[in-house]
Image (tube, rainbow, N blue to C red):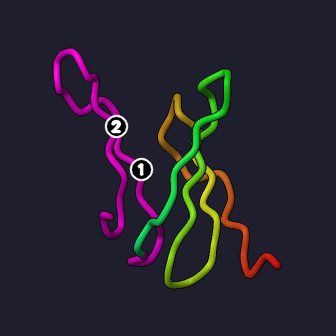
């Protein structure tokens, strides 16, 4: 997995169209996109946080901490 950012590529052109970053260096272990394609979520392996981004802008919307 990548540290600090996730990049989305257009598969048929292999061109990066959006990069999502986190405020601190973390290792992402999973990634999910909602059905509408508006929200992207990634879970971190080392800090056990969930990062939520807006697909349109690439901005970090929320960080969910220490969920049990």
Q: Is residue 16 left or right of residue 35?
A: left
Q: Is residue 23 left or right of residue 3?
A: right
Front of the two marks 1 and 2: 2
Nearest to N terminus: mark 1 or mark 2? 2
Name the outermost residue toward the right. 68
- The answer to whether 5 is drawn above or below residue 14 in the figure is below
Q: Quadrant of residue 27?
A: bottom left
Return the mark for residue 20.
1
Q: Secondary structure at mark 2?
A: strand
Residue 2 in magenta? yes
If the image is split into quadrants, where does the C terminus sit? bottom right
Give how far across and how far down residue 32 sits, in percent. Answer: 57, 44
Residue shown at 28%/31% (left/top)? 9
Give how far across and how far down residue 22 sits, in percent. Answer: 46, 65
Return the mark for residue 1.
none
Mark 2 — residue? Answer: 8
Q: Are marks 1 and 2 in contact (CB under 8 Å)?
A: yes
Q: Secondary structure at mark 1?
A: strand
Residue shown at 32%/45% (left/top)? 7
Camera-side residue: 7 or 23?
A: 7
Q: Quadrant of residue 34?
A: top right
Magenta residues (range): 1-26
Give how far across and how far down residue 23 sits, in percent. Answer: 47, 71
């Amino acid at each position: 997995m990548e540290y600090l950012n996730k990049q989305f590529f257009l598969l048929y052109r292999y061109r990066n169209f959006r990069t999502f970053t986190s405020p601190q260096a973390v290792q992402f272990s999973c990634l999910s996109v909602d059905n509408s394609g508006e929200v992207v979520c990634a879970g971190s392996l080392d800090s056990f946080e969930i990062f939520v981004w807006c697909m349109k802008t690439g901005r970090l919307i929320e960080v969910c901490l220490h969920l049990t």
